[in-house]
Image (tube, rainbow, N blue to C red):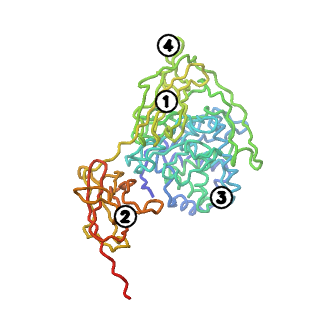
């Protein structure tokens, strides 16, 4: 299990005492399933609240979370005022009870799916909603595409041990863009190593994407139901939440929202959900997650990479109508038929975008398997040439390439900042070399698209300036047999063992006349045929190479094996073959 350490919360007021006060008020108002869910056994509830986390790494790896608490009145209760204040930072009751359409749809579909696949778990969708609220503010207020994918990656702070857990990189930066340490990813904030074990395809598109709310919600549901838990039992419920993030404050906060959502919610259009206090980002980076540095002033001090402001309700909308996914978990539960959601009411648009212009380099390059140093960037301007803030810009990867944006997606929609610029998510080069195109398009506008040329170059071939054999035992064998001892060598460059160095092994006639031999020891190729030269050899991660078995024909004598590494290193090894004794008559 990854080590967990104390976290610094977003708001100084959101302490255990505040969370306890919220739950006390909910209990006093006879919230169902809370005050009496443990049959009055206070000792059992206390034990459950301090239960150890599961053996698997917690989902968010000890990352930060939002500490806002729900209003202390029933949402949508007849006769209640929508202006009744809740706790500091909680917002009004009516707004807080709204859950973005696609996000709400994802939660309900997971509940329906698990009723079939794991009915004993008794997972309520409101629990997913509570965790989604605390982890990402319901995917940044429902800032998602029609398929449920966030318009830009949601990333937690770097888990480098500075105020958070220390988790070294497990995904090569594929999901979180960090090849040194991990970061929690997506609306349900999975760390990459946990996603590798628990990732699910919730929208039937054949991919497991932690940035997709359908995929992430299904994965979270399966995680919460693990180990035979029955979430209608208080002890199992608490243990499941603590397994997500092993913190008593976290447990208190999630339970507060869980009880609040069970008392009533309603659907709101995607992109119009209430954002947690201090959360002003819909882009990648640290914004919206506590940086662990800012203290308790409720302000987000994290410096997000490529972060952009989430569009306000009067900004340009995504005019496409979101529809629930089809497939295994799509449609009305039990019918298998997709049920379209009612179209959202598009807000009014900002001043028109008439042109996109390139900012920075238009030609980008990277080595295979690495990240591009620069990301495509454009500026949106109106007819007068003034920057347009809040415009949506869609970036797409075109062409035959395995390059992807961070999160392993081929497209992402970003929002222009006050200066009119929008930067694409970090671009990751795959293993396929060649040139492809990244196209930037103004969503809902007739402005001409802007295209960037991106080139992936081949990795430089590792080289070695020395080869050395491991061990010095004489290599001997009889005719018509094979050498019993394996032959292993190490390739080094400037004294450092080097991986992936190409090596050629050839049986030669002599060191002075290194012609390929036509008799003596030999190898077997992939088809089992004798060969005296092997070219498809490379050193492993330790810089070592163990040669395939060496066999002998009916010729006795001393023979020479020459190993040649890329970079010029050469090593000759003697092989002694003795005549096999004839069987006794």
Labels 2 and 1: the sequence-earlier one: 1
Q: Secondary structure at mark 4?
A: loop
Between the residue at mark 1 and the residue at mark 3, the CA separation in whole angstroms equals: 39 Å
Quarter of image, res 310:
top right
Label annotation for residue 121: 3
For the residue pair 104 and 146, the one nearer the viewer reads as 146
Between the residue at mark 4 and the residue at mark 1, the CA separation in whole angstroms equals: 21 Å
Q: Position of residue 365 (x, y in %)?
A: 41, 33
Q: Secondary structure at mark 1?
A: loop
For the residue pair 87 and 69, the one nearer the viewer reads as 69
Classify 97 as above or below 380: below
Q: Secondary structure at mark 3?
A: helix
User: Residue at point 60% right, 21% down?
Assistant: 445
Label 3: few (<14), some or many (≥20) within 10 Å? many
Q: Nearer the viewer, mark 2 or mark 1?
A: 2
Labels 3 and 2: the sequence-earlier one: 3
Residue 459 makes an appearance in the image: yes
Label 4: few (<14), some or many (≥20) within 10 Å? few
Quarter of image, res 229:
bottom right
Labels 4 and 2: the sequence-earlier one: 4
Residue 286 makes an appearance in the image: no
Label annotation for residue 183: none
Q: Are dots 4 and 2 in contact, CB under 8 Å? A: no
Between the residue at mark 3 and the residue at mark 4, the CA separation in whole angstroms equals: 58 Å
Labels 4 and 1: the sequence-earlier one: 1
Label annotation for residue 385: 4
Q: Are dots 4 and 1 in contact, CB under 8 Å? A: no
User: To which residue does mark 1 refer?
Assistant: 308
Q: Nearer the viewer, mark 3 or mark 4?
A: 4
């Amino acid at each position: 299990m990854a080590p967990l350490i104390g976290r610094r919360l977003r708001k100084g007021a959101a302490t255990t005492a505040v969370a306890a006060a919220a739950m006390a008020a909910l209990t006093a108002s006879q919230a169902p399933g809370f005050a009496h869910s443990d049959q009055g056994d206070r000792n059992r509830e206390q034990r459950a609240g301090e239960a150890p986390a599961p053996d698997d790494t917690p989902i968010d790896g000890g990352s930060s979370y939002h500490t806002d608490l729900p209003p202390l009145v029933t949402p949508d209760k007849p006769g209640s005022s929508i202006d009744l204040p809740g706790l500091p930072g909680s917002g009004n009751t009516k707004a807080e009870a709204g859950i973005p359409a696609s996000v709400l749809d994802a939660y309900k579909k997971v509940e329906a799916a698990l009723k079939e696949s794991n009915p004993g778990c008794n997972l309520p969708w409101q629990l997913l909603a509570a965790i989604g609220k605390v982890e990402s503010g319901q995917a940044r207020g429902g800032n998602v595409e029609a398929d449920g994918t966030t318009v830009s990656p949601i990333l937690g702070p770097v888990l480098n041990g500075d105020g958070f857990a220390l988790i070294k990189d497990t995904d090569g930066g594929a999901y979180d863009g960090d090849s040194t340490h991990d970061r929690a990813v997506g609306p349900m904030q999975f760390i990459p190593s946990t996603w590798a074990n628990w990732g699910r395809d919730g929208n039937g598109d054949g991919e497991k994407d932690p940035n997709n709310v359908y995929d992430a919600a299904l994965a979270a549901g399966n995680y919460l139901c693990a180990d035979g838990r029955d979430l209608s039992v208080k002890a199992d419920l608490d243990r499941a939440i603590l397994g997500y993030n092993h913190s008593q404050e976290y447990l208190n906060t999630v339970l507060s929202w869980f009880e609040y959502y069970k008392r009533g919610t309603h659907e709101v259009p995607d992109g119009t959900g209430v954002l947690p206090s201090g959360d002003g980002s819909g882009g990648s980076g640290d914004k919206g997650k506590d940086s662990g540095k800012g203290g308790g002033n409720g302000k987000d001090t994290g410096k997000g990479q490529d972060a952009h402001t989430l569009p306000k309700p009067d900004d340009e909308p995504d005019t496409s109508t979101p529809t629930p996914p089809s497939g295994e978990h799509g449609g009305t539960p039990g019918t298998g038929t997709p049920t379209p959601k009612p179209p959202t009411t598009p807000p009014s648009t900002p001043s028109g975008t008439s042109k996109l212009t390139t900012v920075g380099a238009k030609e980008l390059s990277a080595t295979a398997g690495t990240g591009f140093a620069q990301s495509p960037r454009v500026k949106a301007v109106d007819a007068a040439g003034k920057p347009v803030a809040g415009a949506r810009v869609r970036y797409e990867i075109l062409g035959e390439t395995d390059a992807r944006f961070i999160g392993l997606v081929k497209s992402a929609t970003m929002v222009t900042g006050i200066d009119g610029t929008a930067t694409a998510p970090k671009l990751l080069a795959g293993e396929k070399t060649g040139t492809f195109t990244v196209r930037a398009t103004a969503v809902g506008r007739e402005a001409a698209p802007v295209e960037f040329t991106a080139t992936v170059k081949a990795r430089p071939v590792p080289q070695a300036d020395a080869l050395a054999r491991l061990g010095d035992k004489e290599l001997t064998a009889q005719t018509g047999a094979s050498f019993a001892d394996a032959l292993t060598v190490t390739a080094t460059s400037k004294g450092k063992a080097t991986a992936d160095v190409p090596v050629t092994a050839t049986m030669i006639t002599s060191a002075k006349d290194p012609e390929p031999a036509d008799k003596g020891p030999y190898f077997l190729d992939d088809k089992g045929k004798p060969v005296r030269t092997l070219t498809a050899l490379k050193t492993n991660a330790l810089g070592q190479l163990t040669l395939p078995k060496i066999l002998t024909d009916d010729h006795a004598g001393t023979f020479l094996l020459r190993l040649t590494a890329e970079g010029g290193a050469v090593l000759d090894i003697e092989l002694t073959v003795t005549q096999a004794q004839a069987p006794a008559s």
